[in-house]
Image: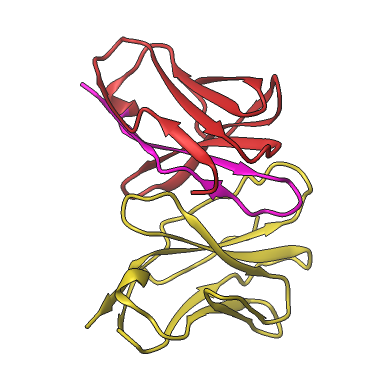
Chain colours: A yellow, B red
């Protein structure tokens, strides 16, 4: 699986968009980008994933650059409840066990 | 959490004693996983299962064993607990049609 690099921490004002970057310069053509988040002491929660097209769901948007070497998770209107650690993971779909590797992620602090 | 129950939620035990953690799912998902989470390490995969009686090792399997006698239950056993196994343990499940994992609420284990 390709290695990912994320900032250790970020701050965002409530109501503003939170843009969380992830670098994955060694990504292969068949590898997807997955985002999960972990709110304090809870289990990680799936947010979104994509291959090369931009994706949007009820939680967030995922923007993947054309060369696929980086991506940005966008929370359009961050709230205090979005304070969490966000994990960017790159992995090819195997059709078998999802042995995802979680790094240390980005700690997002949303403030008033 | 998507139909995943971990028990117990908290446990304190002594070095050298056996400990079993249970994960129960109501989603009928094929794959089940045990992760541990420690400060500075993110989540690390201990063992996973791809069906009844079918299990395999993850990244940090030493000192742990698992069993899956029914689709809905995945047990993690520490045969002789050590202080280095003090951690938060998360169970996860997946269908296998993609890399989306669903996590339980975790078990806080303290080995004194």
Q: Is residue B110 magenta?
A: yes
Q: How many marks?
A: 0
* Quadrant in the picture for residue B25: top right
Residue A111 on image: x %, y %: 24, 79
Relative height, residue B50 to residue A12 (above, below): above
With respect to residue A95, does B45 lie above or below?
above
Q: Vertical placement of A40 versus A107: above or below?
A: above
| Quadrant of res A23 | bottom right
Residue B74 percent location from the top left of the image: 56, 26
- Range covered by the magenta-colored residues: B86-112
Question: Which residue is pictured at 52% across the width and 40% down the height?
Answer: B4
Question: Residue B59, image x and y in percent?
Answer: 54, 36
Q: Relative to A92, is A40 on the left or the right?
A: left
Which residue is nearer to you in this view: A106 or A58? A58
Residue B42 in the image: above or below residue B49: below
Left or right position of B93 against B60: right
Instruction: Tell me which residue sits at (31%, 47%) in the image.
Output: B39
- Residue drawn at x 56%, y 49% is B102
User: Is residue A102 on the magenta stretch?
Assistant: no
Q: Quadrant of the C terminus of chain B?
A: top left
Question: Quick check: A83 left or right of A23?
Answer: left
């Amino acid at each position: 699986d390709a290695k990912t690099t994320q900032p250790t921490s970020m701050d965002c004002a409530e109501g503003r968009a939170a843009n969380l970057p992830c670098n994955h310069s060694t990504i292969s053509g068949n590898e997807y980008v997955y985002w999960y988040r972990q709110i304090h002491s809870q289990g990680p929660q799936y947010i979104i994933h994509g291959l090369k097209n931009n994706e949007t769901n009820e939680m967030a948007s995922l923007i993947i650059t054309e060369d696929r070497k980086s991506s940005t998770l966008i929370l359009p209107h961050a709230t205090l409840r979005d304070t969490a650690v966000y994990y960017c993971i790159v992995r090819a779909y195997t059709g078998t066990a999802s042995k995802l590797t979680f790094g240390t992620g980005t700690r997002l602090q949303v403030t008033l | 959490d998507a139909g995943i129950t971990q028990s117990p939620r908290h446990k304190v035990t002594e070095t050298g004693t056996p400990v079993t953690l249970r994960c129960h799912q109501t989603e009928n998902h094929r794959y089940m996983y045990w992760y541990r989470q420690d400060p500075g390490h993110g989540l690390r995969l201990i063992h996973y299962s791809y069906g009844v009686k079918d299990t395999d090792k993850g990244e940090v399997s030493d000192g742990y064993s698992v069993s899956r006698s029914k689709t809905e239950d995945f047990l993690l056993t520490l045969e002789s607990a050590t202080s280095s196994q003090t951690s938060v343990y998360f169970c996860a499940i997946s269908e296998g049609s993609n890399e989306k994992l669903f996590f339980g609420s975790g078990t806080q284990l303290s080995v004194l």
